[in-house]
Amino acid sequence: MVTLSVGRYLTLKLPHIFDNHGLTCYQRAIPKDLRHRFRGRTKITVKLEGTSSSIALEATRLAAQHDRLFKMLRGKGAEDLGGQQLDAYLLLEHFDLQPGAGQAYVKDHQGQDAQPHLEFIEDYLKGKEEGGTLTPSDRLARKALQAPLPLLLSQAPEVYFSEHKRGAEAAFKQGVLIHWRKLLEITGDIPITGLTRDLAKRYITERAGEVKTASIKREINALRAVLTTVIREGGIQINNPFEALTIQGEGKDSVRRLRFTDEELRTVIRASLAVGDEIRVLALLCCLTGARIGEVTGLRRQDLFLDGAYPYIQIAEYGRRTVKNKNSARRVPVVAIGVRAMKTLLQSTKSEQLFPRYCDGVTANADNASAAVNKYIRALGIKARTAHCARHAMRDLLRHANVTIDVMNEIGGWGSQSIADRYGEGHDLKTKTEAITRALAPVLDTL
């Protein structure tokens, strides 16, 4: 930073102005998170000439220009801007212009509409055109002068993530991007406005030869959610082409999930009690509660109520951890052997999480936990089963124990509630504990 004397009485200390071996320069460090956008450059340097006043004005203009540029590069969709499109925007910024600047007019001294702010960029583009060196980025910049460039499919996910409550979660983003990249493979990186109903149907046709219809349905739901947000936030005047699509033969290729038999449940429970580490206690709680493995994985000390007359676990949202639906937030009773296993595991760690290997108190990595438990189940010689099979087994056990459907749904977080179901606090812990104890009796009585 150097000190400039402007006039007789005014002295300014302006940031970004430096004396470089006798030359006055504007020098601006490129923020570390944006340097990959500048092909590895770490700073911007511009030689300044003229009087102190003109140098001060030019430095102020450059600082404002680069403030806008850095803000733009951190904005919605900026990380996924295509190379040519980004270069076009950078060219506009170089001439201190914004997309749509070609729509602005002022009156000249003769009262005619004029665009003096475009003179420099028009001279630049005309010179390149006459010299035969006009690039695709130059052409895009000229187009952007009349209107902002259309949002491309590759830019859409960042807009979606910026608006979604889970948009900062790496696992959530990865899941969405897997489906979005498949769409890009089929359609190419076209503008959102170019996405048609026929292309959406083509996506179904292409995927039909690779995955089951249930997977296609999930993918379409994810794509539709992204587009709904982008269309709304971008003010794009199109209908969502992924709305109300028909998948031929939907559900007919599904394979019915199998439940654990009573003997398989005993095998898992017996082996888990014998070891008692994180993976085994995870498997044990799935068998004893019927909870989803993601629900169990995210348990913290404050979610465990193990010393009352009716011990239970509290399944709740926190941080970036979500539950599947409104019914999923619930209290689930735990029988005595499960309580002992959790207390023993808690004594082995100072962590506030029951399963610190898979949960950090903000997010729960249910995918990794599920993979580990499923591998453990296979190692016990139980084939074609996963942790989720314990949930199906609990449903049948409750049914066979003649537990009423409303109590059953409160224990497992199943089903949608009617208006009447939402009144009151639901069944008490005593009722639910008696139900789950009765349901597990055929399995536990012969351990």
Image: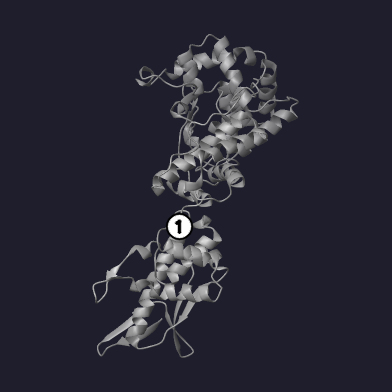
**Residue drawn 56% across and 23% down?**
290
- Quadrant for the N terminus in the image: bottom left
Residue 174 screen position, x and y as percent: 57, 45
Amino acid bearing label 1: Leu
Q: Nearer the viewer, residue 443 or 207?
A: 207
**Residue drawn 50% across and 62% down?**
86
Count of numbered badges drawn on the protein:
1
**Residue drawn 63% across and 36% down?**
207
Q: Nearer the viewer, residue 182 or 342?
A: 182
Q: Which of 407 and 161 is in front in this view?
A: 161
User: Can the viewer see residue 80 in this picture?
Assistant: yes
Mark 1 = which residue? 149
Q: In this view, does 32 lie above or below 262?
A: below
Residue 208: which quarter of the image? top right
Residue 40 screen position, x and y as percent: 57, 69
Q: Residues within 10 Å of mark 1 (few under 14, many from 20)?
A: some
SS assignment at label 1: loop
- 225 sits left or right of 274 in the view: left
Q: Which of 174 and 190 is in front in this view?
A: 190
- 122 sits left or right of 202 in the view: left
Q: In this view, does 337 lie above or below 167?
A: above
User: Can the viewer see residue 14 in this picture?
Assistant: no
Residue 133 screen position, x and y as percent: 56, 73
Q: Is residue 138 above or below residue 424?
A: below
- 90 sits left or right of 39 in the view: left
